Amino acid sequence: MATYILKLTLQSEATFGRGDGVAGLVDTEIEHDERGLPYLHGRGVKGLFTAQCADLLGALEQSFAHSKFKNAATRLFGDGGSDLEANGAVSFSHARLPQGLREAVNAVKPEQLSRMDVVEALTTIRRQTSIDHNSGAAKEDTLRAIRVLMRGLEFHARITVDRNLDAIEQALLGACVKAIRRVGSQRARGLGRVRTELVDENGNSLTEPWMTLFAQEVQA
């Protein structure tokens, strides 16, 4: 078994929407735990990889390399799309803030630092509206408030593989990491720009070496 860490550093505001809002405050609230610490669900992390993998396979469809990478994708992610129960070799944890920050928050009693205190310290609220392209004015009843994470925050997701990866699988994982450019919802509106890095348990970066391997395998 091997374990890797995916690091996601926000280069713009982002929102990990949980699908609902808070009446009178925001229409879209971020996903957060009982202490107010935001996170991206493991399904979302896997979704980032499977979406980029699908794009890569599409780009390679006319290449001799397509077949070997398609087989590697099935071995890694299974046949179940973004379903965490799919029979792939790779599993994904939630992407959470660094352990030191989480421990510092959890060390403070909830009555001294409430859940919403933590949420508000790490986020801000952005308001959006739809524009009528004929009049140039805002459409009625379209103003929405969205809670967004502040840029600069870093999230870590644990990627666990139930065996050692072969070269093709390493290459495909590295290319998927390199291809991830935005995370969360509202990406079409400019949110969620991110810098990604894959490291081993000792902190050694694997992104560039595995991306180089991908380029070599495509050209082979």
Image (tube, helix red, strand yellow):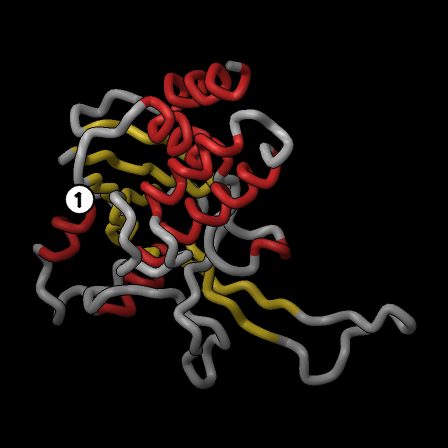
Rendered position, 56 above or below 138: above
In the picture of the structure, the residue carrying the numbered disc 1 is 99
In the rendered image, residue 188, in percent from the top left (x then y), is placed at 63, 55
Which residue is painted at 23% across and 43% down in the image? 158
Q: Is residue 121 in view?
A: no
Judged from the image, the secondary structure of the residue bearing numbered disc 1 is helix
Q: Is residue 102 in view?
A: yes
Rendered position, 197 above or below 126: above
Between 129 and 58, which is closer to the camera in this rendering?
58
In the rendered image, residue 202, in percent from the top left (x then y), is placed at 17, 24
Disc 1 marks which amino acid? Answer: Gln
Between 147 and 207, which is closer to the camera in this rendering?
207
Q: Quadrant of residue 152?
A: top left
Apparent side of residue 137 relative to residue 128 in the rendered image (left or right):
right
In the rendered image, residue 90, in percent from the top left (x then y), is placed at 27, 44
Q: Residue furthest right?
A: 134
Which residue is painted at 34% across and 27% down in the image? 170
Which residue is painted at 37% across and 58% down in the image? 80
Label 1 neighbour load within 10 Å: few <14, some 14-19, many 20+: few
Which residue is painted at 45% across and 16% down in the image? 212
Quadrant containing the N terminus is top left
Rendered position, 153 above or below 67: below
In the rendered image, residue 50, in percent from the top left (x then y), is placed at 44, 48
Between 32 and 150, which is closer to the camera in this rendering?
32
